[in-house]
Image (tube, coloured by chain):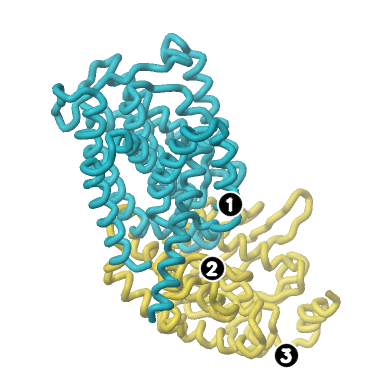
Chain colours: A yellow, B cyan
């Protein structure tokens, strides 16, 4: 199993406060790794380090064996690491078609084409339609992003991320802001899309333990900036103390 | 609005403007030259404002580079070709816009606006104070040049402006319109609109936010200079007033009046503003007051400008017809 994304003794401090310390993890090919932990455990910091939004204060983050320090989101996207955000991120004035096309353009390295026509670019069109179909957005292609329902906006957000053809996709609470009824629907669509699109690894940051239990191949628990556990789901859920630390503290909020 | 409707509107517009000198008095035909000059500049300005979401309050600077560039080329260097002048001022504007833009596009919203305003003021001061170089408040003369290699010597200035130069500028506007239409509908144009709406998401979808903003800034500056050269050529003078911040404000006014969310909005804005200003100036010395009131009305009542209003009326008509 080859390693796709890894951190080596990574630490991050803001001033004198270390929000993440001595953190080593790896995501291999074919894995679905969930990162769990109470609020303030350092999950968001970890995601930001993994996607190059923050630079580590110690250690290093590697993607496909190369450091991502100072690389920036665009280059990371080109290398095959994509990120979906916790809060819904779409383009309010762009249509569904245009939103997905924006990602397809990047993937097909057409972003600097100033004078070529976008309508009538069959390669872009075909891919946009394919992605829209996977996420059930085919009937919405001409709709303006801002007019979609919350669930559809979330799907569009994730669909546009998938349209980048990433090797690894990082999902930061992909079902937050979505009704409980829709959560599993979105996750199933996501995982089916990942399989179909040949995504090699998924990192999921999630509060909802139902989702974590249902889909993970491995669970990493964080607490107070340190790794608490790195276990397969059966062993993770067999440890009541561990679950209490991860969930119990959440109830305190 | 679909593509064929846009093509039809553009064609009707071009045909009407082509026939204008045959029916309209020479005065109004001459008045169309600044309309074309502003429209060319505004097509660039709106790539930055309407499509990239960056509102520049210093765009008059690039008009100034165009006008002063034309003055230097024609009066100091003795260049006779207006095409060569256009290429030179656009190149000069690009070179000047690169470092200024690289700094400004790191900021958005009011900070971008204020920075561009500051650079515009700086340039105005330079033109105003460096008398020996720029002629100070009396400006620099822009000598008559040839267009397409022809000097039209038998035409006096007024005939030249209302005749050959009118069609020349219309041609320039059509070419600029076609090029800009291509750019806003290209993959690059889509990324511009994406990063206008949500820069964070756009960056994670692979759009180079800073570089694309800079590219839009540079393209808009080059077209600003082209428009400025037309304006300077028409008056025969490069005037520091062209760079004063009220001039930059006037460009914003035109874009808002015409409607910056529509491709044709800036052209409609340039036309309406110029005609309105001309009529109001002949009616009352308080013309600025009336223009101000109209701007307030547009912003409150029709935030999408004249083009937006026209589009809405057209949609209502098709809806009631079906």
**Mark 3–mark 1 distance (CA, rounded to whole Å):** 68 Å
Give the foreground label among 3 and 2: 2
Q: Secondary structure at mark 1?
A: helix
Note whether A106 is above or below A69 in the view shown. Answer: below
Q: Nearer the viewer, residue B185 or B166?
A: B166
Give the foreground label among 2 and 1: 1
Q: Which quadrant of the rendered structure holds the N terminus of chain B?
A: bottom left
Q: Residue furthest front?
A: B283
Q: Secondary structure at mark 3?
A: loop
Q: Quadrant of residue A86?
A: bottom right
Chain of the residue displaying label 2: A
Residue behind mark 3 = A238
Note whether B99 is above or below A120 in the view shown. Answer: above
Q: Residue at x 33, y 50 (%)?
A: B180
Q: Which quadrant of the rendered structure holds the C terminus of chain B?
A: bottom left
Residue behind mark 1 = B297
Q: Position of residue B62 (x, y in %)?
A: 42, 33
Q: Residue at x 41, y 67 (%)?
A: B314
Q: Position of residue A75 (x, y in %)?
A: 45, 56
Q: Position of residue A103 (x, y in %)?
A: 42, 66
Residue behind mark 2 = A90
**Mark 2–mark 1 distance (CA, rounded to whole Å):** 32 Å
Q: Earlier in the sequence, mark 3 or mark 2?
A: 2
The crowding category of the residue bearing disc 3, from other C-alpha atoms within 10 Å (few below 14, some 14 to 19, many at least 20), is few
Asked if marks 3 and 2 fall on the same chain, the answer is yes
Q: Is residue B133 left or right of residue A73?
A: left
Q: Residue at x 71, y 88 (%)?
A: A237
């Amino acid at each position: 199993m080859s390693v796709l994304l890894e951190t080596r003794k990574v630490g991050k401090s803001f001033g004198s406060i270390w929000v993440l310390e001595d953190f080593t993890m790896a995501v291999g090919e074919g894995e679905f790794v969930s990162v769990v932990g109470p609020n303030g455990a350092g999950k968001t910091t970890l995601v930001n380090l993994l996607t190059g939004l923050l630079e580590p204060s110690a250690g290093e983050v590697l993607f496909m064996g190369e450091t991502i320090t100072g690389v920036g989101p665009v280059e990371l996207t080109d290398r095959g690491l994509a990120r979906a955000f916790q809060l819904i991120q779409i383009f309010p004035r762009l249509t569904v078609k245009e939103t997905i096309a924006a990602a397809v353009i990047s993937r097909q390295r057409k972003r600097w084409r100033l004078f070529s026509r976008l309508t009538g670019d069959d390669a872009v069109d075909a891919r946009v339609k394919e992605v829209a179909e996977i996420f059930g957005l085919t009937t919405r292609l001409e709709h303006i992003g801002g007019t979609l329902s919350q669930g559809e906006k979330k799907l569009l957000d994730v669909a546009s991320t998938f349209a980048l053809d990433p090797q690894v996709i990082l999902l930061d609470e992909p079902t937050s802001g979505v009704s409980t009824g829709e959560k599993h629907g979105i996750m199933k669509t996501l995982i089916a899309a990942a399989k179909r699109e040949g995504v090699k690894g998924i990192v999921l940051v999630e509060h909802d333990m139902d989702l974590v239990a249902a889909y993970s191949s491995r669970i990493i628990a964080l607490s107070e900036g340190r790794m608490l556990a790195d276990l397969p789901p059966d062993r993770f859920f067999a440890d009541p103390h561990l679950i209490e630390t991860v969930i119990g503290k959440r109830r305190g909020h | 609005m679909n593509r064929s409707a846009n093509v039809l509107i553009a064609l009707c517009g071009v045909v009407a403007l082509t026939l204008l000198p045959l029916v309209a008095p020479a005065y109004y035909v001459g008045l169309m030259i600044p309309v074309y000059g502003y429209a060319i500049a505004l097509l660039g300005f709106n790539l930055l404002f309407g499509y990239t979401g960056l509102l520049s309050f210093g765009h008059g600077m690039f008009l100034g580079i165009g006008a002063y560039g034309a003055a230097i080329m024609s009066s100091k260097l003795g260049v006779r070709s207006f095409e060569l002048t256009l290429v030179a001022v656009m190149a000069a504007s690009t070179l000047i816009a690169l470092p200024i833009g690289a700094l400004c596009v790191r900021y958005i919203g009011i900070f971008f606006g204020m920075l561009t305003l500051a650079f515009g003021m700086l340039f105005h001061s330079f033109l105003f104070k460096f008398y020996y170089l720029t002629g100070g408040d009396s400006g620099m003369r822009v000598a008559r040049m040839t267009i397409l290699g022809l000097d039209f010597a038998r035409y006096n200035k007024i005939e030249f402006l209302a005749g050959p130069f009118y069609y020349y500028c219309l041609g320039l506007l059509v070419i600029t319109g076609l090029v800009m239409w291509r750019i806003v509908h290209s993959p690059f144009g889509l990324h511009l609109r994406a990063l206008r709406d949500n820069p964070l998401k756009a960056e994670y979808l692979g759009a180079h936010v800073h570089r694309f903003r800079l590219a839009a800034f540079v393209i808009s500056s080059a077209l600003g200079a082209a428009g400025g050269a037309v304006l300077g050529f028409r008056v025969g003078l490069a005037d520091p007033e062209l760079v004063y911040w009220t001039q930059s404000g006037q460009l914003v006014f035109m874009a808002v009046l015409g409607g910056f969310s529509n491709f044709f909005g800036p052209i409609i804005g340039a036309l309406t503003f110029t005609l309105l200003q001309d009529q109001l100036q002949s009616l009352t010395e308080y013309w600025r007051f009336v223009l101000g009131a109209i701007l307030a009305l547009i912003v409150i009542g029709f935030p999408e400008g004249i083009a937006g209003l026209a589009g809405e009326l057209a949609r209502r008509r098709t809806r009631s017809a079906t």
